[in-house]
Image (cartoon, rainbow, N blue to C red):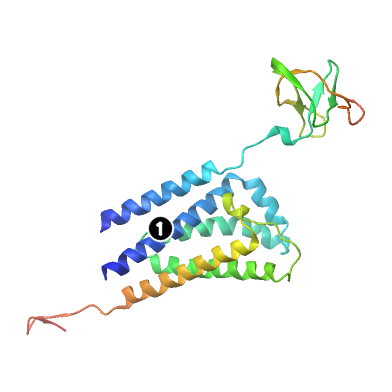
Amino acid sequence: MKKIKWSILSLTVVFAITAAFTSKPHFDCTTFQQYYFNGSSYIPVSAQYGCAAGSQFCTYYTTNGGITYTGCTIGTYNGCMGCAVEAPKTK
Amino acid sequence: MFKRQVLLECISALLILLFVYASLSKFLDWRTFNREMAHQPLPHTLTRLLVWIVPFTEIAISVSVIFERTRLLGFYASLVMMGLFTIYTAIVLMHLLPFIPCSCGGVIKRLTWPEHLVLNSFYTGLSALGVVLQRKKVLKPKPIFHHQSNTFV
């Protein structure tokens, strides 16, 4: 009986821990406003931006009001119509 | 006797599953849990305390229902905690409070308030059953061996 008890309880604990880790919400940078870097400043883009294949960062995001920007999506920004939603911000 | 023991182990396992999962989910998404707790219609000082009390109580209950000595205490604590959660959910469903964000962890937060009420009621009932069964087991008088007549009294 004791062996069965400890087997069931151990399995339950392992299952609960695994479930908690697998259902942990993952950080998704694309939920933040996206910006593209035009060489001198970061320009906010609308949701319809396009990224061509590439190895550099296509869009960036900021979590501190534009003080620093972090790369988010990979590729080469190829723009889209009406992407700029506000005045460009300088870094 | 054997059936009751198996039932007690199953109740303990279900409580451990819920409380370990819920507490760990809170710790893994600590920032969200804090934010949601801060939006509860409770005094700020109380929510600051509850942020720590709730997950640690859940872990304490999980540990206490494992061991025979502390199991009854664990069932009582679980009954009180789940009872309070059920009352809270019922208050929300009766619209006695404005909209309250869910402060539970992991996939449980995806449940609607009526689903929450069902889950909480189920676990409150389960804890109550655990208390009844464990009390019967603990308080059952053990037979005393009478040496002179070589019989159990």
Depth check, front residue: A50 or B15: A50
Residue at the spot of label 1: B13
Q: Quadrant of residue B142?
A: bottom left
* Residue A70 in the figure: left or right of residue B70: right
User: Element at badge 1?
Assistant: helix
Of all residues, the one furthest to the left in this rendering is B149
The correct choice, above or below, for A32 with respect to A36 in the image is below
Q: Is residue B90 visible?
A: yes
Q: Is residue B69 visible?
A: no
Residue A39 on image: x %, y %:
83, 15
The correct choice, above or below, for A57 with respect to B31 in the image is above
Residue B44 on image: x %, y %:
72, 60
Other residues around mark 1 within 10 Å, as few (<14) / some (14–19) / many (≥20): many
Residue A41 on image: x %, y %:
86, 21
Depth check, front residue: B49 or B8: B8
Q: Residue at x 64, y 62 (%)?
A: B113
Residue B109 on image: x %, y %:
62, 53
Of all residues, the one furthest to the right in this rendering is A87
Disc 1 chain ID: B
